Amino acid sequence: MAECIYHHELPTDERYIRVITIHPSMEQDKVHIELQEDPVSLDNEDHVPYEALSYAWGSETDRESVTFGAGGQFSLSVTQNLAEALRYLRYADRPRTIWVDAICINQNDDTEKSTQVSIMGDIFREASHVIAWLGLETVTTRRAVELFEEMGSQIEIVNWETGDRRPSATARNKALCDSTSPLPYTASDGQAIMEVLERPWFRRLWVRQEVHLAREASLLIGTFSITWIHIQTAVICIYYRASHFTPFDEVTRTTTFDFATSFCKPNDIQLNLLRNSLRGTQCRDPRDKIYSVLSLLRDQSWLNIMPDYGAPAAKVYRDMALKYMSAVQRLALLESCQLTEPASTLPGLCSWVPDWSTDLSPQPIFGPSSMGTMLYSDILYQDDGVLRVSGVEHSSVLHFQEIDEEIVFVGLNSLHEFLTKISPSKDMECVPYISGGSLLDAVSNTLYCPGFRHHSPPSLSHVPTYDDVKWHIGSFLATGPLVSGDDIPHIIQWVWRRLRGLRLFTTPDGHFGLSSKWIRPKDRIVLFPGAQHPTVLRRWEDGGFKVVGSCYLHGVMQGEPFLGPLPAGVNQILYSEDEAGCLRYKDLNTGVITLEDPRFRMLGIDVTPFEDRWKQGEWMKLDASVLKDIGVKLVDFLLI
């Protein structure tokens, strides 16, 4: 087939692409397409206008033929889903020029694929219109389209991340923006919306950049068309509405709807958060877990990753991880690593490299931490997949308890049993914790990983206070085992949901922590400069260590093993009043919030070079050698 279609290789001196023409015909006729002889240069501002198709390929075994060539002398085999899309895209009275990846890229030429994938974002940016094909219509499609258009046309999203919105200039029902008033829809309306959001297109990873980069995009379901911005707006509107005012709450509060909400936010992606961002997405080639989001990747401007379909996925992942770690001198990617059982299906993948081809198992939802973010990492790649990293070995795993029950009261009872075993007294408030405070303080912070109000932005007033959480956990521990039908407080149910699939653990010296289900007794807990959270390592047969994952360990999350405890009267917070997403230090006596860690001056560290940068809101980074100057002993670990 390739010999019949691709008579010439695409030139490489400019950003060239091929486009096809769908010839006009009636609906019942076989689709007839033609590959245009002259390639289109995206570097030419006056290039031939074209549309671009976004779709899920569908099953490779379920294929259909379309006629191909100027006289229709060839037969081209495509997936049935693509054949259906071409039929519905075809005009009855005029030709249509469009770009379709499966046809316009020679799929048998890895060099061409690599080049075309590197400009994929440009292909969709330059298209006059992007059409997303979701498949054939059903009995509920018409109603879903009406709902998406009704909400989407009357609402404007002010902030996609927080869901802030306002009525559009043409809004007929301004109450759609009001979270305190009910949506005028029914549960069956919710089912119609979910029928659209559950279609395979939403799970295909490539489509994210295809619609988010488009000048104009619409979704096509059979003969029905919906503008992409209206779907985005409607989904965000529903998601951020108070749940008790949502008549179809049962279907919208699902993982599918959560996934759709994340998909609909037009945000760029950070490499250190990529594995979480990819959760639930699908693509055929594991290398495409990276290549398909390059145009959305915030770090791509300086990483400059070039697709290479001639390299195995494990090498692609390792080279990118190493390039990122070496450039930023941080170990944030270790938080996306897990030593699973069975191990990764990618041959030769190093444990210190995230396996972007698979979803992360549940892991703790961390609160604010400066465990190592104020320090640069000390790393050296030693060939053969070995990464030498300097750190401090803090402790090891002694006992653990997994919380993986589907029934709430059963899971909470296993939690209750474990906690009562590790406490010498039923009243944990009376039991001192190794790093200060009580055992109840440690347990409360660990179970909530802390998400308390004093760590949060002022706008999140619904976040519980530390005293609220501590009181509920203390009351829960003071009672006996739960039985079916017991009234379980909302905070305790929320704790159980956070813990499902995780393991609580203790260390020989009495620390208390939380990690993934992959930890085992005797696993080492190591603190690396440049890693935001403690890392769990496992000694391997050849003397090296494999990364098991990250953990929360109460008493070390604010960098205490490096810098000692924070002075009394100072709290670490995740947000200041003027900017989100960066750690600050708040003096509880004066209310002053600053970027400067007060421990630096206490330890005699010269901060003079950083004072002007602090005033401008810039974060401070110190070389790991500073730790040696203040007496911290760093040890080398060989990660394999």
Image (spheres, grey):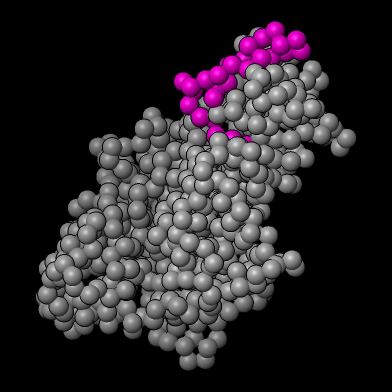
Q: Quadrant of the N terminus?
A: top right
Q: How many marks?
A: 0
Left or right position of 109 against 319: right
**Residue 629 is at least partly visible in this image:** no
The residue positioned 71% from the left and 20% from the top of the image is 33
Q: Determine if the magenta segment contains residue 66.
A: yes
The residue positioned 47% from the left and 66% from the top of the image is 246
The answer to which quarter of the image holds residue 407 is bottom left
Q: Position of residue 367 (x, y in %)?
A: 42, 68
Q: Quadrant of the C terminus?
A: top left
The residue positioned 45% from the left and 47% from the top of the image is 279
Left or right position of 226 against 80: right
For the residue pair 418 and 308, the one nearer the viewer reads as 418
The answer to which quarter of the image holds residue 559 is bottom left
Q: Position of residue 586 (x, y in %)?
A: 50, 82
Left or right position of 406 against 319: left
Residue furthest bottom as drawn: 589
For the residue pair 485 and 92, the one nearer the viewer reads as 92
**Residue 409 is at least partly visible in this image:** yes
Q: Position of residue 532 (x, y in %)?
A: 44, 61
Q: Is residue 21 above or below residue 251?
A: above
For the residue pair 306 and 379, the one nearer the viewer reads as 306
Q: Is residue 401 above or below residue 293?
A: below
Q: Position of residue 307 (x, y in %)?
A: 60, 32
Bounds of the magenta segment:
54-80
Q: Determine if the magenta segment contains residue 18.
A: no
The residue positioned 31% from the left and 73% from the top of the image is 490
